[in-house]
Image (spheres, rainbow, N blue to C red):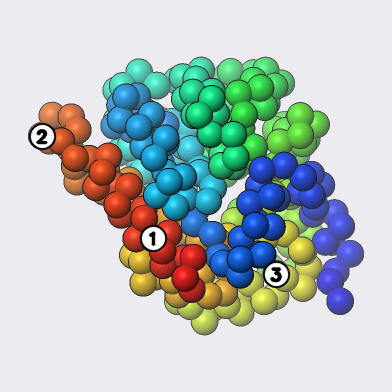
Amino acid sequence: MKSALASQSNATADSGRIAARFASLKARQQSGLVTFITAGDPDLEICTKLLAGLPKAGADIIELGMPFSDPMADGPSIQSANLRAFKAGVKLSKVLDLVRGFRERDKDTPLVLMGYYNPVYVYGVEKFVRDAKGVGVDGIIIVDTPPEEDAEICQPSLNQGLNFIRLITPTTDAKRLPAVLHNASGFLYYVSITGTTGSKSAGAEPVRAALAELRRHTSLPIAVGFGITTPDQAKTMAQTSDAVVVGSAIVNRIASNLDGQGHAKVGLVEDVLGFVESLAKAAHNR
């Protein structure tokens, strides 16, 4: 029997693009692929092309990073992507413009904004969640606001019909879990390692055990991220999760296709999307 927490953690999870995508994956008995790129990395033109190509390459859900000067949970790869985006002049208003352009072409692929509270606070929380909903954002991940501060960004997001996606870590104990699950919606993002993004790889068995315990308390889909860098790792984690999240490896692929001045080499978009396609095949064919 699932915990009573399950009903609390499904605040707005029973409708919308995210719920529809996970329902479709479940019907096909597949795990999904969640891809992360930083908005404006390495520039707005290339990022726009990557966004447009990710669904066709097999991305089931897209996480779009909101550039921030001090991304504490992220490793060197995503920190560098943030710097490239800043150099390209990307602010939160331009992130929303990217989403608007994407949604004009793609009405079905769920898109989640991921980042830190400071840029949202500066933009204005109520204005941000209203504008995000208006351009077609489906969910929000804010990594540095704990459940005790739900009034700051979580509740306004839910009030606008945006999923608020929680991160759960290996150090989230039974005492802490109810607070983390409360108001969570869309899906849960299980951080498979302790440390920053891209720093190391997770073991399959500890993740399997952690997800089995989580499923005793929630019916939300669970995506596993941090430390998944290859198709083989994606396939392994897909066998126990509802989706796998790949971020740093994709960002590294972008970086490897830049010249000494940080400009995109010919073929960057095709190479990155080819890599995403290999990850998607691994996740879907678990």
Q: CA distance from mark 3 to mark 1?
A: 25 Å
Residue at the image point whose x is 71% and y is 36% from the top: 162
How far apart are the two marked residues, 2 and 3, measured between alpha carbons? 45 Å
Q: How many residues crowd around disc 3 within 10 Å: few (fewer than 14), some, or many (20 or more)?
A: many
State the SS at label 2: loop
Q: Please say if 80 is above or below 169.
A: above
Q: Nearer the viewer, residue 52 or 115?
A: 52
- Mark 1 nearby-residue class (10 Å; few <14, some 14–19, many ≥20): many
> Which residue in the structure is indicated by mark 1?
279
Q: Which mark is residue 214?
A: 3
Mark 2 or mark 1: which is in front?
Answer: 1
Identify the residue position indicated by label 2 in the image: 260
Q: Tell me residue 97's x, y (percent).
A: 50, 20
Q: Is residue 7 visible?
A: yes
Q: Determine which quarter of the picture holds residue 104.
A: top right
Whichever of callouts 2 and 1 sits on the residue coming sooner in the sequence is 2
| Amino acid identity at mark 3 | Leu
In the visual, does 125 lie left or right of 114?
right
Which amino acid lies under the numbered mark 2 shown in the image of this protein?
A: Gly
Residue at image x 36%, y 66%? 231
